[in-house]
Image (cartoon, rainbow, N blue to C red):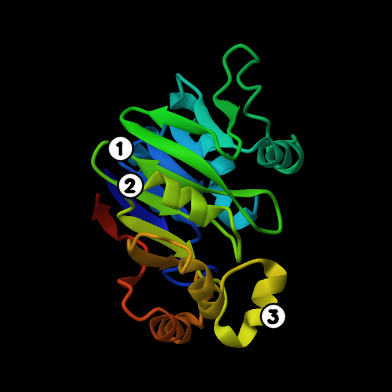
Amino acid sequence: MHLRVLGCSGGIGAGLRTTAFLVDEDVLIDAGTGVGDLSYDEMRRIRHVFVTHSHLDHVASIPLLVDSLFEDLKEPLIVHAQQATIDALRQHVFNWRIWPDFSELPDHEHPVLRFEPLEPGESVSVGNRTFEAIPVRHTVPAVAYRCSNAVSAFCFSGDTSTNDTLWPALNRAGALDMLIVEVGFPNADVELARLALHYSPGLLAEDIAKLDVRPRVCVTHLKPGDEARTMEELREALPGHDLHRLQGGESFQL
């Protein structure tokens, strides 16, 4: 599998894009502002979007992507998400007030957008890859995704904090080459992290001890301005782990 980081920041600013990952050429995991850096031809190849949760920094590009591709979408773009996430997108985005409902356009029989419910514990195969939804703890219903094929596997935590659901699921699955995990706040803001249900370095260190394997740990969702401090605290909290701060534009071959 080829994994391309389109966006991995906890905010915006010059050179910063919010969460979006491209798997091979045809699958997005989340669709934050990073999708906007793709060329039109690259966007045309996307057939599936797996959404972790409904927050704007993870879904902002879905309505714009469908609108941009409207004339070329001979088959609908498929958005996989929990029903609660789909309901939020329908009510608050694709509602004809914020954006047209592309699940009804150009008509009911031939929409350019299709929502497919995917609940925690369920999985979907796209080609030779399997995407498993794993429940996590956040301020809205949220999942992580474990993506695997015959030779490799990675997991993206989505937005979460202290939980006892992600780690047992990963342990049951076995081999894991890469864990992409969010750390939204430095340790000084741990109470805010608890309230917002994001990780701080200390909270992540407590949870990652529940994992039986030692994948490469790639850190995402760092708050602008706090990146260096948070990474330093992570290195102190997680000695012996292969830590890497994700950057937009990076690619990995798994």
Question: Mark 1 near mark 2, Cβ–Cβ under 8 Å?
Answer: yes
Q: Residue 23 lies in what quarter of the image? A: top left
Give the residue type that dot 2 points to.
Ala
Question: Mark 2 near mark 3, Cβ–Cβ under 8 Å?
Answer: no
Above-or-below relation of 23 to 189: above
Give the residue displayed 47% in from the left and 82% down from the top: 230
Mark 1 and mark 3 lie on one chain; the one further toward the N terminus is 1
The one nearer the camera, 27 or 179, is 179
Q: Characterize the local packing of mark 1: few (<14), some (14-19) or many (20 or more) Cα atoms within 10 angstroms.
A: some
Classify residue 243 as left or right of residue 48: left
Give the Cα distance between marks 2 and 3: 33 Å
**Where does residue 163 sit, x and y in percent of width and height?**
61, 61
Question: What kind of element bears circle 3?
Answer: helix
Say which residue label 1 marks. Answer: 149
**Where does residue 152 sit, x and y in percent of width and height?**
27, 45
Mark 2 and mark 3 lie on one chain; the one further toward the N terminus is 2
Say which residue label 2 marks. Answer: 153
**Where does residue 185 sit, x and y in percent of width and height?**
57, 77
Please indicate, yes or no, whether residue 8 appears anywhere in the rendered image.
no
Give the Cα distance between marks 1 and 3: 38 Å
Classify residue 154 as left or right of residue 119: left
Say which residue label 3 marks. Answer: 191
